[in-house]
Image (cartoon, rainbow, N blue to C red):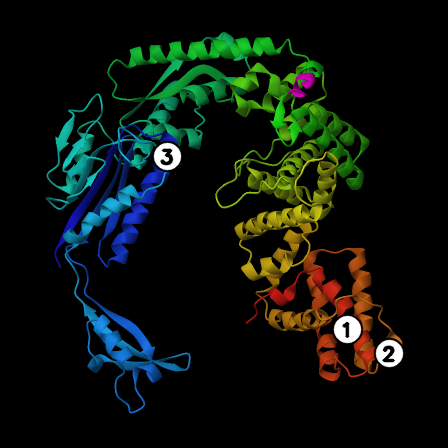
Amino acid sequence: MTKRNLLLEIGLEEMPARFITDSINQLASKVENWLNTNNIGFEGISIFSTPRRLALLVANVDERQEDSEEEAKGPAKKIALTEDGKWSKAAMGFTRGQGMTVEDIYFKEINGVEYAHVKKFIKGQETFDLLVELKAIITGLTFPKNMRWADLELRYVRPIKWLVAMFGNDIIPFEIAGVQTGSTTRGHRFLGEGEIQLSAPEEYEEVLLGQYVVADAQKRKDAITSQLEKIEEENGWVIPVDEDLLEEVNNLVEYPTALYGRFEEEFLEIPSEVLITSMKEHQRYFPVKSAEGELLPHFITVRNGDHLHIEKVARGNEKVLRARLADAAFFYKEDQKMQIESALEKLKNIVYHEEIGTIAEKSDRVRKLVRLIAERMDFAPEIVSAADRAAEISKFDLVSQMVYEFPELQGIMGEKYALQKGESRDVATAINEHYMPRNADDSIPGSPAGALVAIADKLDTIVAFFSLGIIPSGSQDPYALRRQAAGIVQTLMEKKWDITLENLVGLSLNLVSEAGIGKRSEEEVYHDLIQFFKLRVKHMLQERGIRYDLIDAVLGGEIGIVSALMDKAAALQDASGKEDFKENMEALSRVLNIASKKEVLGEIEPERFENEYEQKLYEKYLQLGKKAEDGMDAASYYQLLAEIKPEINDYFEHTMVMAENPDVRENRLNQMAALAVLIMKLGKVNDIVVK
């Protein structure tokens, strides 16, 4: 079968950098799925993207669909045939609809019932005739934000300026938003020659490179990285590369040229975090450090162009940055006049959420929650004192000019300003750490005081919003409640705090209810919160590679102490690879299954035992309970449960739990239920799939 290359390019006004990578991946995925669904063979897809284009080059596409044979299922045999064995109207209608005759029918059994079937040959269509369907793929792309232009109905990320759709040398004809497909692309907005005619899809990348467009995003990124490394080597600098910034810069340029400039050393008196944030967030510059890690008065930027007049470009960037840093210096100087107590007064007038209250009111609840958690955790007095003060003043930097200008510096500036105002190092550190982990790649708070305030602050936020009925759904999570819940779980796990998640939720829910926040019953809110946290724990276990059924088992009851739950999952995962795991789980599961018939746990009365197997299992139960009270790791506890397997098997072999005598039956059910309680400490093992 002959083959051709397929080129698809969407030319646009400059797109937001953060949209580009996801958009081109979405386009590639949709086109690949379309080709596979339509049985059109191809060798591979190359993706290209710049601020002004999303493009695909599909190599060696078959010129015609593959022929196929399709099996169609019709009515059951008893319906397809009449009582005298002739074809019914239903059978004839079925075959007619398939373009076949009753002579083509054969019967095939499905779940014990015979059905009429036919096989029909489907000749593949010409690929070119189908490619017009690419129009629907283009218009069906989704973006975080869309816009309309002129009087058109189409909503898209940015106005479409040109479309290239070529199958070999042929143009695939369709139109979108008044733009007709063709073979004309465009080079660099300033360095290129304008419109360029393509003679074949495979020349796309090379032609654009001649027009100062590096269309392959990865090659562009590699070029930027290589240029940064060269600047480092030539100057003896260290350029810390933020991957998110590199990705953004890469999607801002079509022809990257890295250059460097400098700023006045006096600006180094400003905290380095402020300088770096100003360079990164406002100008998309990379900072420069010495080999010792000290910030230097230089910056790196990436120009969308060539090396011509590079010195003039550097001077222009220096001028812009100088103004930015002068603003930062002014904000920093003005913030020195701020007093913590006066800042706290201002927080009383700043609404956190109209139905939750002010930031000051939230801080007050967090402070109370910190104290309650500290009491149950029995922390040292100095830790409690530091956490209490940190919770009280944790948000004071929100009224500073620096944080108003750079919200991402909240906490960071709080720590620095707190130290300047005479607060202890522990308090200042906790102010910064209470926002941690700020993202999935961030670490948890290092100090106990910081962890206390971090958990209390995040938990108060989650509980308050759940009480209002504001719960994340689908991709909607405007208050980042999932991220904050994951931060709580991660912190509890790594700190190995001996407090249950249920206890924490209950403490916070009481405070939120006392504050009069909420439109729902406490029972309903509590249930939703526990399920919400279970999903976060489940996600963390999945990331650790724990089997799905083992996750269901350990989450079958309470979450409890997070670190202990993680240990249970790990112990079960390890045990699942051993030979005796199946037999152990079957024995323990029998207990749980029969215990489920007992709703209320009653006392076990040994005098009602009717055989020695009841007594032996009871003695094992007492030993298990005693050893479990002493505390042990999950792996040892699993082994302890495994040791009672012989007694469980003997019990069920010689004992009928559901005896006719109601007193005997009740006593045996109580024995099963009591043992089930101890088994459930490991997990709901009857949810485990054993083979």
Q: Is residue 646 visible?
A: yes
Measured along the vertical axis of the image, is residue 91 above or below residue 571? below
Measured along the vertical axis of the image, is residue 52 above or below residue 684? above
Say the numbered circle drawn on residue 26: none
Q: Looking at this view, is 314 or 45 the one in front?
A: 45
CA separation, marks 1 and 3?
61 Å
Q: Please give left or right for residue 116 compared with residue 600 in the image.
A: left
Q: Are marks 3 and 2 in contact (CB under 8 Å)?
A: no
Label 1 packing within 10 angstroms: few (<14), some (14-19), many (20+): many
User: For the point 51% across and 12% down, which residue is it?
Assistant: 328
Three-letter amino acid code at disc 2?
Answer: Arg
Residue 346 inside the magenta-drawn segment:
yes
* Residue 274 on image: x %, y %: 52, 18
Give the main secondary structure, helix, strand or loop, of the magenta stretch.
helix
Q: Which residue is mark 3?
A: 19
User: Which residues are drawn in magenta?
Assistant: 344-349
Q: Please give left or right for residue 451 compared with residue 11 in the image.
A: right
Farthest residue to the right: give it.
607
Q: Which residue is mark 1?
A: 669
Say the numbered circle drawn on residue 608: 2
Three-letter amino acid code at disc 3?
Answer: Phe
Residue 224 inside the magenta-drawn segment:
no
Query: Which is nearer the N-term, disc 1 or disc 3?
Result: 3
* Residue 329 on image: x %, y %: 53, 10
